Image: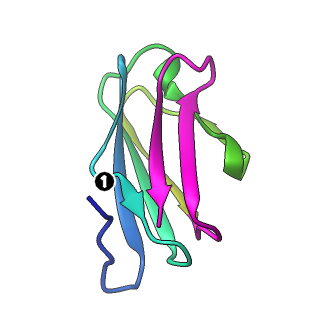
Amino acid sequence: KVAGINSEGIQEVTINAMTGGYVSNVDSIKVGVPTRLKLVTNSTAGCSRAFTIPKLKYQVTLPATGEEIVEFTPTEKGVLSYTCSMGMYSGRLQII
């Protein structure tokens, strides 16, 4: 499923960070389109709260419950991987 583009021209992605890993509402985003990742936690424990996107040099410790927003514009096609700081949990978005 490809991310939808809102009325502001931004593609939005929700990633749920759970105690046992990550679940995204989409698996693909478009190159050259501003992107907003909404990282959502709900009583999340463990290393999945230590969220990182190596390619963007982005790293944050998520709250146990709450939201964090990451905004960027993908500049090249390929794979955008994200992981916990220990590498135990991971996910990816295909950039098309």
Looking at this view, name the residue that lies furthest to the right: 57
Q: Nearer the viewer, residue 40 or 92?
A: 92
Q: Can residue 91 be found in the magenta stretch? A: yes
Is 54 drawn above or below residue 74 in the view shown? above
Residue indicated by mark 1: 26
Q: Is residue 73 magenta?
A: yes
User: What is the secondary structure assignment of the residue under circle 1?
Assistant: loop
Which of the pair 31/86 is nearer the observer?
31
Residue 37, quarter of picture: bottom left
Can you give x and y, in whole percent of width and height, for residue 36 in the image? 46, 63
* On-image quarter of the N terminus: bottom left
- Label 1 Cα crowd, 10 Å radius (few <14 / some 14-19 / many 20+): some
Q: Position of residue 74 (x, y in %)?
A: 59, 67
Q: Is residue 42 left or right of residue 85?
A: left
Report the span colored magenta.
72-96
Chosen colour scheme: rainbow
- The residue positioned 29% from the left and 29% from the top of the image is 42
Could you tell me which residue is drawn at 63 percent across and 68 percent down?
A: 76
Residue 45 is left or right of residue 33, and the answer is: left
